[in-house]
Image: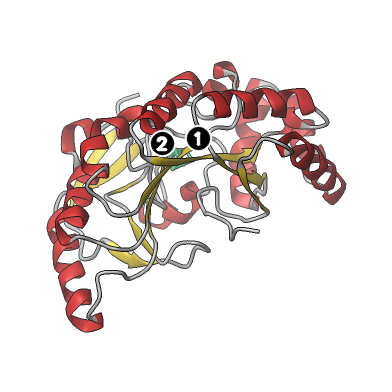
Amino acid sequence: MIPKINFIEAKSVFTKSGLPGADWVINPYNGCLFACMYCYAAQIARWKHPDEEWGTYVDVKINAPEILKKELERLHKKLNTKKFGTVFFSSVTDPYVGIETKYRLTRKCLEVLAEFRYEGNISIQTKSPLVTNDIDVLKKLKDVTVGFTITSLDDKISRFLEVRAPSISSRLEALDKLNKSGIKTYAFIGPILPHFINNDEKINDLLDKLQKVGVKEVWFEHINLSPKIKSRLYEYLKKEDSKLITDFENSDTQEYRDNLEKIIKKAMQGRGMKMGLGKVIYHKTLPKKK
Ligand code: SF4
């Protein structure tokens, strides 16, 4: 597949966020080549590309760092503070989608925030180890957290549903590197895929692995598919392995969720890790801490 890369001039990149846990959101790109089959951004970003398949295009906001700088200065003048709330990278893309190696817009936006001396929390959520290339910039930020989405320990499952995202093993290595560099991290286990049902062994294996790479905070999110996302996913499953549709259907009940929560809470006991358990809709939202 040859991705379609569009270059656009953004009018704004520091956008007020409606997501719980994030006051502002920065999307240096729009669209994501990782093409995850459960991706909610596929629906949110769709209005700009109604006829294109999610995962085949990216809009590159070539002026993102310059616009960000202006927006931060404007807000600083207006609010007389350098702390406007939590800033989240990103809601309609992965901020470290592969082409970041070429355009480095996420890096440049982080540099702008560092030069501005932004005082609020900056939260980055990704599936890509490319974020480790920016450890030098991350260290200059006052309050930054990097989260990795980890939905399984099995690279085959990941490859199947997170079609072109970096392997789980490379994400775990990146978490290790970030933790060893003193960057705060978390793991986002969401959506919790149906293979975890009634399986405390799988949950425990995953948590063991996360602890081994130094993760101290874990967020869980139940699978919660909107009708459009469900139809995209089910179309794919029908072609690839239709019995999986039953697994997804069976996981969409309150009883399933209650049971899963019991397993998760038990598995978390005694680990000394912070936990968030959400039923939020958006896959990259940080649910409110309990
Ligand atoms: S990495 Fe995130 S934004 Fe990109 S396709 Fe996957 S779920 Fe969507």
- Which residue is rendered at x = 59% and y = 61% of the image? 288
Say if disc 2 is inside 8 Å of ligand 1: yes
Q: Which mark is on residue 192?
A: none
Q: Quadrant of the N terminus?
A: top left
The answer to whether residue 28 is above or below residue 247 is below
145 and 281: which is toward the camera: 145
Name the amino acid type tagged 2: Gly
Question: Circle 1 sits in a helix, a strand or a loop, which is it?
Answer: loop
**Picture quadrant of residue 204:** top right
- Which residue is rendered at x = 55% and y = 48% of the image? 283
Mark 2: few/some/many CA within 10 Å (<14, 14-19, 20+): many
Is the Cβ of the residue at disc 2 closer than 8 Å to that at disc 1? Answer: yes
Question: Circle 2 sits in a helix, a strand or a loop, which is it?
Answer: loop
Name the amino acid type tagged 1: Cys
185 and 254: which is toward the camera: 185
Pick out the residue farthest to the right: 255
Residue identified by numbered label 1: 36
Q: Position of residue 164 (x, y in %)?
A: 43, 26
**Picture quadrant of residue 121:** bottom left
Say if disc 1 is inside 8 Å of ligand 1: yes
Residue identified by numbered label 2: 55
- Which residue is rendered at x = 41% and y = 36% of the image? 55
The answer to whether residue 221 is above or below residue 101 is below
Q: Quadrant of the C terminus?
A: bottom right
230 and 122: which is toward the camera: 122
- CA gap between label 2 and label 1 equals 8 Å
Q: Position of residue 232 (x, y in %)?
A: 58, 40
Q: From this viewpoint, is residue 61 visible?
A: no
15 left or right of 116 in image: right
Mark 1: few/some/many CA within 10 Å (<14, 14-19, 20+): many
